[in-house]
Structure formats: structure tokens, C-alpha cells
Amino acid sequence: MFKGIDRIKYEGRDSDNPLAFKWYNEEETVAGKTMKDHLRFAVAYWHSFCGDGSDQFGDPTRFFPWDNVKDPLDKAKHKLESAFDFITRIGSPFYCFHDTDLVGNGTVFEIEKRLDKIIPLVKEMQDSTGTGLLWGTANLFSHPRYMNGAGTNPDFRVVANAATQLKNAIDATIALGGQNYVFWGGREGYMSLHNTDMQKEVDHLAMILTMARDYGRKNGFEGTFLIEPKPMEPTKHQYDYDTGTVIAFLRHYGLQDDFKINIEVNHAILAGHTFQHELQVAANAGLLGSIDANKGDYQNGWDTDEFPTNIYEVTEAMMVILAAGGFTTGGINFDAKLRRNSTDPVDLFYAHISGMDTFARALVIAHRILGDSDYNDLRKQRYASFDSPEGSSFEQGRLTLERMRGLAMEYGEPESIS
Ligand code: XLS
Ligand code: NI
Ligand code: NI
């Protein structure tokens, strides 16, 4: 599929070769770590090897060499070879998948059977190419059985099916040495309160996550469970609205020691926030896990999943990520897709190169702003009045409103606004 395209190399800023990196030099060290170790890029199996360009208004525009292979397992193998061919040529250390991206959809036991057969082959592919699994997940939203949700479905039989698919996806993730396991809410939300018992549904969701945690830990999963917030689409009210909502949920149900947040740029925008804001909220809670890198459209109200090329947005994000100490098990997954009218296989390279270069460049700039400018000092100075004895007494909880009144009398009306 990608014949004639060599391993993408770093050629530096002066290169005009569209099939070369201008900024991403995996061996280059920034702040004591190589770019490869900082950024931990991952290719998304679904957009890159399943996305056919179709949308609500039109048929597929992109065709894969395995489209006409009848046997689901043969199809899965064919796709696997092309996927790893791409991953190796672009030089991404990781990739991510949903169970159904690998083996197609069906009954949960059909999926189970196919996974049992394909996972050893995926493992071989990982080992022979030196690629790691950043995270695995189960697709609990595409099949018609999930039209009213998976963990939050009002029909217990659907919940049992969802749990089965979930168990198998965790098994696959463990077998492949996955560093994280992701839950994006899919259809875990609702359309109308009139037919929805919200409390019951949210309790059920927590129960499924608790079972997943217990199962994973019991079976040797040492990675991080991640929740990926999204405020809307496909349901009107998604239970994992944004990072703040998810943090409250995790703490309420006692899941905060095993779960962190996977923040997607476009989801942050849909929630009326910025990506940077969401990262900072997670970092403050010590729950910044991983990111789904893409770019939203500021005029559209849906998940456009464009490749990230906004250097300002990404630089500000990298400043928060660096200040929080960087990724541990997490990384940068390109949850981004080619446009419908982008139909050449080589376009997948241009798109990933742009995204990887944008993040690498942002990493360099962010590191310089944090280290070589007065950015941090200026922000600190803004709160300097809290370093006074009274200010620090306040922060330590040693003042009362009465004492504050006394201090206000002493200070009088503040003259200059600092
Ligand atoms: C959809 C989500 C999805 C998750 C994985 O909006 O971003 O792609 O990342 O299920
Ligand atoms: Ni995502
Ligand atoms: Ni998304």
C-alpha cells in the first residue's frame, strides 16, 4: 500500500522534502530526554486503517487493498501488515486500537474468537518492528446493541455483552503489553431525562469501571486506566462531559488511584474549554494521563478530528505537559483523520509528519519559554502578596473572616491593581 515511500527521516528546517521531518528528530535531547521519549507518538488504527472517508452524506472515498477480502480473519491479517508497514515507515513508537479496528464487528463471541486468533500475530508484529501498544480499548458504541449505551444501557443483557467485550479487550491489551487502557464514553449519556434514570446509569457506569479495574489488576495489568472526556456527540449529554466532571466522578467512586484522564483537543473545544485548560485541570489533580492529539474547528460544533497543526495551541499545551513533569505511561495518540477528499495513501504520511513536526517544534518552544524566559517568574510575582506573613497565614487556614476584616481596615482600599 505504501510502496515507494522510504522510512521518514529527519532532514531539518531547511529541507523542502515533504516526506521528511523538519522538527521531529527522535534522538534529539530536550530537557534531558529525547524527543521520542517526551512525545511518545502513537498512530490510531481506526482513523488510519479503517476510515474510508464516508460521512452522513456520502459513500466511501478511500479504498483499502483488503476491502474485498471475505474472511474476517484474513482481512484482519492483511490490514495488520499494512498498518505496521505504515507505523514503521513513519517511525511511530506506539499505536492504539479498538478491538473492532483489528477484527471487525459482530457478536461479542465472534469478536472474542477472532481476537484469540489475531492477537498472537499482532504480538509478533509488535516484536519484529519494535512497536509498543500505547493503549487498547473496546468499541462499545458502533454495534446496534449499544444504541442506548453500553455500561449505562437500561437492559442488563446488553450490559453483560458490553462487559464481555470489555474483558476481552483488556485481555488483548495485557497480552500486547499495552501501557494504558482507555474508556471513551461512546454512548454513555442520554438524550432525554424523561426516560432516563441518571443516578442509576452513572452508578452502573462506575460499577463497570470498578469491575474492569479489578479484573485488570487481578490479571497483571500494571498500566493506567484512562477516561477520555467528551461533552456531547453521539449523545446530547455525555456523562464524561469534561475533565472536571470526570475527576469528581473518579473521586466519588474511589477510582482515582487507578484511573487518569486522556484529554482530546477537539473534545476540550466542544466542552467550551481550551485544550490547555483541560490539561491544567487534570495536572492540578495529579491525573494527567495521556492525550488524543487533533485539532477542532472553532466554528463547527462537532468532532472534526483534524491533524494538529496549530503551533500556538500545541505550544501552550506542551508548556502545561512539561510543567506537570511529562508523560509516564501516556503519550500522544493521533486521534485524527484525513479529510474525505484526501484519497492518496501518501496523504497519511503528510498528515502525520505535520502533526509530529508541530508537537516537536512546540516541545522546543515550550521548553525555552519555561526555562529561558521570565514567564514563570512573572506568574509567581503576580501572587507575591501571599508571601507576606498574613498572606501565608491565610493560605494555611489560620485566619478568620473577623481577622480579614481587621487586615482590610489596616490596608485600606488597594490603590494600584497589580
Ligand atoms: C471519539 C473518541 C474515540 C476515542 C476512542 O470521539 O475520540 O476515538 O478516542 O474510543
Ligand atoms: Ni479520542
Ligand atoms: Ni474524538
Image (tube, helix red, strand yellow):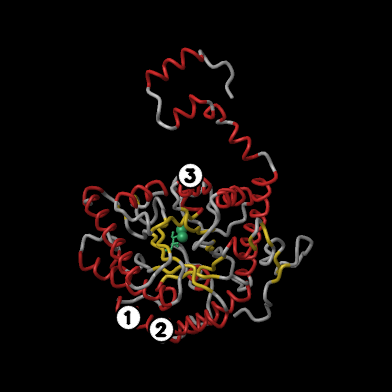
63, 357: nearer the viewer: 357
Q: State whether label 1 is within 8 Å of ligand 1.
A: no
Q: Where does label 2 land, which residue?
A: 72
The image quarter containing residue 159 is bottom left
In the image: residue 416, left or right of residue 99: right
**Quick one: SS at disc 3?**
loop
Q: Quadrant of ligand 1?
A: bottom left
**Quick one: SS at disc 1?**
helix
* Residue 319 visible from this viewpoint: yes
| Farthest-out residue, right | 14
**Mark in the foreground, 3 or 2:** 3
Q: Compute the Cα span from label 1 to label 3.
A: 40 Å
* Residue 336 visible from this viewpoint: no
10 Å crowding of disc 3: few (<14), some (14-19), many (20+):
some
Q: Compute the Cα span from label 1 to label 2.
A: 10 Å
Q: State whether label 3 is within 8 Å of ligand 3.
A: no
Say which amino acid is labelled 2. Answer: Pro
Asked if labels 2 and 1 touch by Cβ distance under 8 angstroms, the answer is yes
In the image: residue 315, left or right of residue 170: right
Q: Could you tell me which quadrant the N terminus lies in?
A: bottom right
Say which amino acid is labelled 1. Answer: Glu
Q: Where does label 3 land, which residue?
A: 273
Q: Where does label 1 land, which residue?
A: 110
The image quarter containing residue 43 is bottom right
Q: Compute the Cα span from label 3 to label 2.
A: 41 Å
Asked if labels 2 and 3 touch by Cβ distance under 8 angstroms, the answer is no
